[in-house]
Amino acid sequence: LRASRDLGARWREYPAMSAPAPAEKEQGWFSRLANSVASSVGEGLNYLTGVEDPDELQTMDDGSGNVTNKDDADAGGRKAMWSQLKDLVGADIMSKFSIPIFLMEPISVLQKISENMQYCELLDKACDEEEEFMRLAYVAALAVSVYSSNERTKKPFNPILGETWEMELPEINGIYVAEQVCHHPPIGASHCESPRWTFDLTSAVRTKFMGNWVDVYPKGRTRIHLKECGDVYNLLPPASRANNLVVGRLWVDTFGEMRVNNLKTGASAVLTFKECNMFGAGRWEVSGDVLGADGECKLKLKGKWNESMTATKPDGSSGRILWAKNPEPKEGALVEKYGFDNWTLRMNAAKDAPKGLLKSDARLRPDRMALEKGDDTTAQKMKHVLEEKQRAERRKREENGTEWKPRWFKLAAEADLHELELDVGTAVWEWNGAYNEGKAKRVENGIDNVLETEFDPWEFDDTKDMVIP
């Protein structure tokens, strides 16, 4: 769920039914108060969304700040979605709700998390720096740059267990590989490597649905290793909120504290993502400090997560632009409908698929391909087929008394967790090296035509040919 690109100058029209910044851990009387508020929100949204009179949901914001009676193309979908969600106020909806096609974009979550690497050249720049704190500033800039794609409102497809995604990165002489390693809860693992650095991520989220908005708390562990200097970094990201799920135009805000820690030296970058207030002030703004192990400020960081980041000395002198967002494409069906940038377009392009592409690759998903072509009906049908096949495999494992075993990642028996990561909210998965060992054979026997290859992430041979009504 991402915010649309035309929100930049006009977002003030979309503040409906939001709330103060979320605090994930609530206890005692405050928790009971929150549940009471959630109940009230649910009752209010029943009224606002017209559960008694569904035609009321045909009203929409026309982009001028005024509510009109134009037919909303997504109104029927929103009504159906609310009928499923209204009893889940206050709950984590990640595994309790199947997202309808009208809210989706034609990529997988595995592809979405690869947007971490859109500006991976920043890690090369960090490697070029002799000074410790400027290296940390570049790593922090990479962490902020991830959010530059957060103005898209559509949600990616949930990966099928065993689904993968690969991408060659010739600009850094590197490769990126991701795999869905767990389905309940949904967990993806990824590994990116160049001759100069590695990036490893175990990615999961926890959500809290509050009626017309949902709070999203990233979970998991990030490791960045700069090989030449030996620096190792971790990342603790801020929370996000998707606003106006049911009433109004969808938009996303990211706010709270982000920390990037140098686990070797004890230095850290502490950044604050400013929450957008009801009058529009603060949207996109990020600022913070690079601190030495002694807590002394070494550099000041400032910028906007959808635009650029700059580093200066503590007195404001010697400014340096660390990162600036790439120009966006101006035309194309996927650009106009989903707000895709050049990186996202490249993710699905058959010509950019690596040689020896795995048949479990997200590019090959039939629901994703149908949605990309604008065939929502087929996309919805194929999404159902994939989900039913996944359930069939789960039942078969239960009958056999076996468990799914990922191909390219292994469960870390004793994960090396920093003291700030003791509650990462998920198991940690690490790269097992098997992908590189079989690469040459896969290239030799690889896929000739990506667009005509059947998606096959399945554990059992007969799953692929299973007929789903």
Image: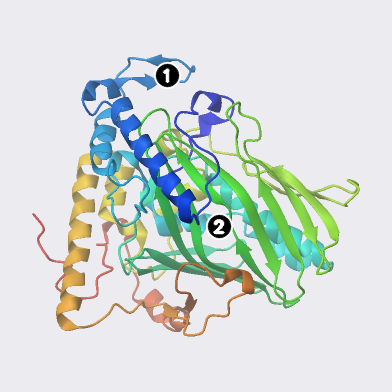
Query: In the displayed structure, does residue 224 sit left or right of residue 370?
Result: right
Most foreground residue, 174 or 60: 60
Quarter of the image with the N terminus in it: top left
The residue lying at 33 percent from left, 79 percent from top is 405
**x%, y% of residue 445?**
33, 76
Task: Residue 295: tell me if it is visible.
Answer: yes
Per the image, label 2 sits on a secondary structure element best described as helix
Name the residue that disc number 2 marks. 116
**Rendering quarter of residue 123:** bottom right
The residue lying at 42 percent from left, 33 percent from top is 244
- Is residue 406 shown above or below 98? below
Task: Residue 154: tell me if it is visible.
Answer: no
Most foreground residue, 30 or 355: 30
**x%, y% of residue 370?**
27, 46
Amino acid on which the number 1 mark rests in the picture: Asp
The residue lying at 63 percent from left, 56 percent from top is 143
Between the residue at mark 2 and the residue at mark 1, the CA separation in whole angstroms equals 33 Å
The residue lying at 44 percent from left, 45 percent from top is 34
Furthest residue toward front: 29
**x%, y% of residue 392?**
16, 67
Question: Which mark sits nearer the N-terminus, 2 or 1?
Answer: 1
Query: In the displayed structure, does residue 385 sit left or right of residue 222?
Result: left
Query: In the displayed structure, does residue 1 sit left or right of residue 295?
Result: left
Name the residue that disc number 1 marks. 62
Most foreground residue, 194 or 184: 184
Q: Residues within 10 Å of mark 1 (few under 14, many from 20)?
A: some
The answer to whether mark 2 and mark 1 are in CB contact below 8 A is no
